[in-house]
Every structure is written in C-alpha cells, then in structure tokens.
Amino acid sequence: VQLQASGGGVVQAGDSLRLSCTASDLSGRIFSRYHMGWFRQAPGTERTFVGAITNTGSSTSYADSVKGRFTISRDNAKNTVYLQMNSLRPDDTAVYYCVSDARRFELVMSTPSFWGQGTQVTVSS
C-alpha cells in the first residue's frame, strides 16, 4: 500500500490545517478494507499515535493530546483520509505520518502495517 500524505506547512498557534493522505495504488473497494490512521514524530522523540478511523468510518479514536481539536475522516470513493487540525499549538509541531492496516482496528493504532512518507507541520507561537 502506497500512502501519500500532503497538506503540511507552517502556521501560527491557533490556526487550522488539514492533512490528506491518498492510497494511490488501491481501488476504492480495496481501500475500504483498510483502517487508517495518523502518527507524528517531533524532533528527538519517538513516533506517537494521533488518531485513527475504522475502514467504514463508523468509529474513530484519538490520542488524549488532540481530542477535541483534531478530527479524522475518510472518503472511500477518493481513497483518501483526512486529518483536520484546529487550535494548533507549538507542541503539535512534528512530522505527520499516514498509516494503514487491514487487520484489527487496534493494530492501526499501535503497529500499523503500512506507513506513508511524512509531511511536516510547524506551529509557531
């Protein structure tokens, strides 16, 4: 599975940003089998879970640090998952990675099978 993330950039604290991730090598029917998620990695730290959505979009899960500010959604017809980030803070600065897994939903939040390239998000104070 080839995942291509986009939408990163430099914003100020309090701003919003929307990341997109497209599975370019999958048909819509196959994409809908995959749970999707986002991780992030700040400089000098390990990658951490941000949010995930089930293959049907019926359920989502978020890290405590982003609950109420970030929203994950998907459009299976477009093979795309989104991460809407509102009320951004400087500690949200990180490289954001799109992930996917067709196994249990819990695994896309812990040890996903597929990773995309990262997109940099920088939030200035």
Image: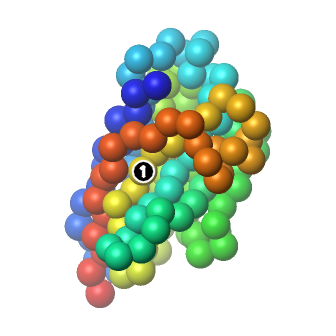
Residue 55 in sight: no
Q: Tell me if 125 is positioned left or right of 61 in this view.
A: left
Q: In the rendered view, tell whether residue 22 sits above or below residue 69.
A: above
* Front in this rendered view, residue 47 or 83: 47
- What is the residue that sits farthest to the bottom in this orientation? 125
Quickly name the residue at label 1.
Answer: 97
Q: Residues within 10 Å of mark 1 (few under 14, many from 20)?
A: many
Examine the rendering and report whether any part of residue 66 can be seen: yes
- The image quadrant of residue 22 is top left
> Looking at the image, which residue is at 52% across and 51% down?
38
Which residue is painted at 71% across and 50% down in the image?
60
Residue at screen point 61% across, 48% down = 111
Q: As rendered, which of 69 and 26 lies closer to the eye?
A: 26
Residue 93 lies left or right of residue 50; in this view the side is left
Above or below, comparing residue 69 to residue 6 in the picture: below
Looking at the rendered structure, the secondary structure element under dot 1 is strand
Q: Residue at the left extreme?
A: 10
Tell me the kind of residue under disc 1: Tyr
Residue placed most toward the observer, 103 or 58: 103
Please say which color scheme the image uses: rainbow
| Whole-percent x, y for residue 27 in the image | 50, 12
Where is residue 54 shown, x and y percent of the image? 70, 38
| Residue 78 placement (x, y as % from top left) | 47, 23
Q: Position of residue 121 (x, y in %)?
A: 31, 63
Q: Give the position of the C terminus as an image quadrant.
A: bottom left
Residue at left offset 59%, top offset 75%: 65
Q: How many marks?
A: 1
Left or right of 51, for residue 26:
left
